[in-house]
Amino acid sequence: MNESPVTGILLVEDNPKDLELTLRVLRKAGLAAATRVARDGAEALAYLADADSPAALPGRPIPRLILLDLKLPKADGHEVLAKIKGDARTRSIPVVILTSSREPRDIASSYQAGANSYIVKPVNYEQFAATLMLAAQYWLQLNESSRPEG
C-alpha cells in the first residue's frame, strides 16, 4: 500500500446546518483547509478503506482526527466507529463523537467501541465553537499520537 498524505480532520456529518456550522468553526481555527467531509457513514468508510479495497477512494489523505456524528444514513456512526477501531490501519486515529444525542446507551456504546471522546453538540453557537476548537486543538496540537510508520 502506498503511503497517503496526512490531513487534519475527517468530519462525518449529514446534517447540512450542522456541517456548515462545524466548518465555520474550523475555518476560524484555521483548520478548514485540512478538513475532509463525508456526508454519510458509507462515504466515511469508503474514505478510510484500505487502498486495495474496491471501496477505496484513490489519493485520499489519512486523517489525524475524526469528528463523527452518530445518526448517519447508509451506515450509522456506531458501525463506522466499530470499523475504524477494528482496523489496525485506523484504530489509532482519535475519534471524537460529535452528536446531539445525550442517550446513555449511545454514550456507553461509543466508549465501549473505542471512542476517544463524546461531545454533545451545544445549541448555543458560542459554546459549540469554543468546545469544538478546544477538542480540535487538543487532538491535533497537544495530544501525542501513536501512528504506525509505513
Image (cartoon, rainbow, N blue to C red):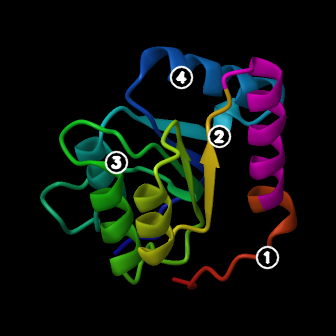
Q: CA distance from mark 1 to mark 4?
A: 28 Å
> Crowding near pointer 1: few (<14 within 10 Å), some, many (20+)?
few
Near mark 3 (Cα within 10 A), the count class, few <14, some 14-19 or many ≥20, is: many
Q: Which residue is mark 2?
A: 34
Question: SS of the residue at dot 3?
Answer: helix
3D distance between C-alphas at marks 2 and 1: 18 Å
Q: Amino acid at mark 1?
A: Glu
The answer to whether residue 19 of the structure is visible from this angle is yes
Q: Is residue 105 above or below residue 100?
A: below
Determine the CA span between mark 4 and mark 2.
18 Å
Q: Give the labeled residue for mark 4.
A: 18
Q: Earlier in the sequence, mark 3 or mark 4?
A: 4
Residue annotated with mark 1: 144
Which stretch did the figure color magenta? 123-138
Mark drawn on residue 46:
none
Tell me residue 1's x, y (percent): 34, 75
Is residue 150 or residue 107 the one in the foreground?
107
Q: Residue at x 41, y 60 (%)?
A: 105
Q: Nearer the viewer, mark 4 or mark 2?
A: 4
Dots 2, 1 in contact, CB < 8 A: no
- Closer to the chain start, of discs 2 and 3, is 2
| In contact (CB < 8 Å): disc 3 and disc 1 | no
In space, the residues marked 2 and 3 are separated at their CA atoms by 16 Å
In the rendered structure, find residue 44 and report the number of the disc placed on it: 3
- 35 or 24, which is in the foreground? 24
Disc 3 marks a residue whose amino acid type is Ala
Relative to 124, 94 lies left or right: left
**Main SS of the magenta segment?**
helix
Q: Quadrant of residue 95?
A: bottom right
